[in-house]
Amino acid sequence: MPTTVTKQLEPEVLKARIARFRQVQSEIVTQVRRVIVGQEEVLEQVMIGLFVGGHCLITGLPGTAKTLLVRTLAQTLGLVFKRIQFTPDLMPSDITGTDIIEEDPANGRRTWTFVPGPIFGNILLADEINRTPPKTQSALLEAMQERSCTVRGNIYSLPAPFFVLATQNPIELEGTYPLPEAQLDRFLFNVILDYLTAAEEMKVIDLTTITTIDTADTVTTDQEILDFQQLVRMVPIGESVARHAIDLVRATRPRDESAPDFVQKYVNYGASVRAAQFLVLGAKARALMKGRYHVTYEDVRSLYAPILRHRILLNFHAESDRLKQDDILARVLEWKPSPRD
C-alpha cells in the first residue's frame, strides 16, 4: 500500500526554513495589526489553523470584525479570497459550481462545461453558515475533509492551500439551522470572538473614522504556506505530552473508564479521535510560533477548550444546571493537571 514520506531536510535547510517561518509569522501579525485591533487570542488560533491546514469556526456577535479579519488575513497571505453569504435559499451548486451546456458556434455541437463555484479559492469565508439548510451546509463536508468536490459524478480538486473560515452569530436562533455534528467535527477550532476593551474600541474609532484607512501588505505565498504546514508536522512531541493530550480527550467520553464523575453526569457524547489529532497538530504549530522546537504540556492545555468545545454534546442535566461546554472542559483541566505540575 503506497504511503507518503516526508523528505528529511538537511540541518542548515531546516534552520533556514524555521527562521523564515518566524519571520513570516511576525510579519503577518504586524500587517494584520494595521487593520485589526485586539483579539490576540483569536488571531493566534486562526494562524495556528492556517499553519496546521485546518478550518476554523468563528463564533461572534455582529460588528466584531469577523469578516474584516478573514479578508485582511487573505490579503496578507497573498491567497485567493472567496466569500459566500449563506442564506436559506442557497443551493449546493451555488457553492461547488455546476455543469452548463454550451454550444460551439463553429460546428453547433453542445457540450457540458463545468463552471467552478466560489469554493475554488484558497481562503473561503462561509459567512453566517448556520443560516442555510443542512443540505447546503453538507456541500462543504467533502471539500473540508478531502480538499475536493464532486459535481455530476466528476471529482474536482480544490486549490492548495484550502482554508475554510466559517462565521456564525450565537445570539440569533430564529431562521438558523444548527450545524450537524459531522460538520462541526471537521473544524479545527471553534474560536470565540468577544467584545473589545474600552481602550481597544477607542483605537478602532481612531483608525476607522478618518479619511484614510490602512490596508495589509502581502508577506508570503501559497507555496510557502504549504512548506510551513509540512514544517509544523516535523516538530517533535514527547510520548508523555502526547499521552497527556490523549488522556484529556478520552476524559470527555462518558463511557470511557477514565472519565471523571462530572463528565459521566453531564456529557452525552465526548470528543472523537480527530480531536486528539488536531490537539497534537495545533500544539506543534503553537510551539513553533512560540520559538520552541518541541511541544510542551502548556501548548496542549492552552488549545484544549477551543479545539474541543464544539465536539462534546451535553445532556439535560448540564442544561438544567446551566453548564456550558467550556465549564466542563475547565473542570477536566482541573481534574487532570499536567504531569509536571
Image (cartoon, rainbow, N blue to C red):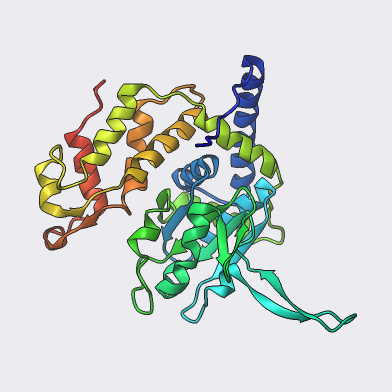
Query: Which of 58 and 142 lies nearest the eye of the viewer?
Result: 142
Would residue 201 be seen by someone viewing this image from the given angle?
Answer: no
In screen coordinates, is 214 left or right of 335?
A: right
Would residue 260 be seen by someone viewing this image from the given angle?
Answer: yes
Residue 188 point in image, percent of width and height: 42, 48
Find residue 224 and report its image quarter: top right
In screen coordinates, is 98 left or right of 333?
A: right
The residue lying furthest to the front in this view is: 1
Residue 69 point in image, percent of width and height: 56, 54
Above/below status of 61 relative to 103: above
The residue lying furthest to the bottom in this view is: 108
Residue 302 point in image, percent of width and height: 35, 37
Residue 115 point in image, percent of width and height: 69, 71
Query: Which of 207 and 302 lies nearest the eye of the viewer?
Result: 302
Work out which quarter of the rendered image holds the C terminus and state it: top left
Query: Which of 233 and 303 lies nearest the eye of the viewer?
Result: 233
The residue lying furthest to the top in this view is: 11
Find residue 103 and report its image quarter: bottom right
Q: How many numbered callouts?
A: 0
Name the residue at 57% across, 74% down: 93
Name the residue at 63% across, 24% down: 19
